[in-house]
Image: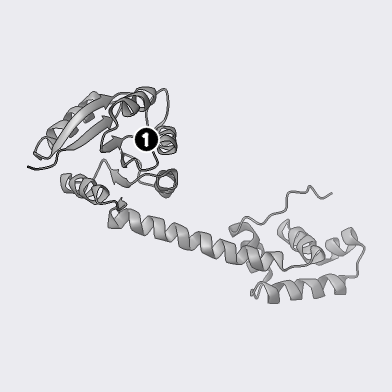
């Protein structure tokens, strides 16, 4: 006898829930056992039903989907939750995966993507389409690059960081020398060392390095 997969739906749009029920009803092994129209209801109903899979929207009233996801995963670490959402940008993909989702499927995806997500998640794996996998890997690489740049920045001396900050704020070498009570030659030497350490060749590249890696210091210099 075929094992039945008990599925719960959480989406604030009745039309979406109806469409999902019709779609899932095409598979004899799937059974929709409950529906929730808001986050609080989703949390309550999940605890009551403990379904095999929860298909969860992010944009829910009363409690957003990300919070619902975190709450359920805290109480049920093995919970299998597939996020089905209209959001497809890096921010949401990262947030969903870090919150513990087992799968991520955009609402613009085709029927087979949802079927594939369910079957993949049932086997204990995380489901992402190639498109979302690319976004996630690109994000990881970008963070890795930023961490590498941050390590280089940490190797700078306090004086070098101070001079770099003034350069980023548009101060000339003469102005920096006056601010720090140094000779222009000393400031220029620090700038040259900065460029070597950060592997750049022009002042504009120094400034771009700081801004692109969000390394601006918080102090308000006068």
Nearer to us in this view, 28 or 188 = 28
Determine the residue located farthest toward the front in the rendered image. Answer: 1
The answer to whether one can see residue 26 in this image is: yes
Total tally of numbered discs in the picture: 1
Q: Does 53 appear above or below 119?
A: above
Give percent across and percent down for residue 177. Answer: 87, 64
Give percent across and percent down for residue 213. Answer: 60, 59
User: Which residue was labeled with disc 1?
Assistant: 58
Give percent across and percent down for residue 51. Answer: 26, 34
Q: Is residue 192 left or right of residue 68?
A: right
Q: Residue drawn 22% across and 45% down?
A: 118
Q: Is residue 217 left or right of residue 30?
A: right
Nearer to us in this view, 20 or 131 = 20
The answer to whether one can see residue 204 in this image is: no
Q: Residues within 10 Å of mark 1 (few under 14, many from 20)?
A: many
Element at badge 1? Answer: loop
Q: Residue drawn 25% across and 32% down?
A: 8
Q: Quadrant of residue 176?
A: bottom right
Q: Quadrant of residue 19?
A: top left
Q: Does 174 appear above or below 196?
A: above
Q: Residue drawn 63% across and 63% down?
A: 150
Q: Is residue 199 left or right of residue 63?
A: right
Nearer to us in this view, 72 or 38 = 72
């Amino acid at each position: 006898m075929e094992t039945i997969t008990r599925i719960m739906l959480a989406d604030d749009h009745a039309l979406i829930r109806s469409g999902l029920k019709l779609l899932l009803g095409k598979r004899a092994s799937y059974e929709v056992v409950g529906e929730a129209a808001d986050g609080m209801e989703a949390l309550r109903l999940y605890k009551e039903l403990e379904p095999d899979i929860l298909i969860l929207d992010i944009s829910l009233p009363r409690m957003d989907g990300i919070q619902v996801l975190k709450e359920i995963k805290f109480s049920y670490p093995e919970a299998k939750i597939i996020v089905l959402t209209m959001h497809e940008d890096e921010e949401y993909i990262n947030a969903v995966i870090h919150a513990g989702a087992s799968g991520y499927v955009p609402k613009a995806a085709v029927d087979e993507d949802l079927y594939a997500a369910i079957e993949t998640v049932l086997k204990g794996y995380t489901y992402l389409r190639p498109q979302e996998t690319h976004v996630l890997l690109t994000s990881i690489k970008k963070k890795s690059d930023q961490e590498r740049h941050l390590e280089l920045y940490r190797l700078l001396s306090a004086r070098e960081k101070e001079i770099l900050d003034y350069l980023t704020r548009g101060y000339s070498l003469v102005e920096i020398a006056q601010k720090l009570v140094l000779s222009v030659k000393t400031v220029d030497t620090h700038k040259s060392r900065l460029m070597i350490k950060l592997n750049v060749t022009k002042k504009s590249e120094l400034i771009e390095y700081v801004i692109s890696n969000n390394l601006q210091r918080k102090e308000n210099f006068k």
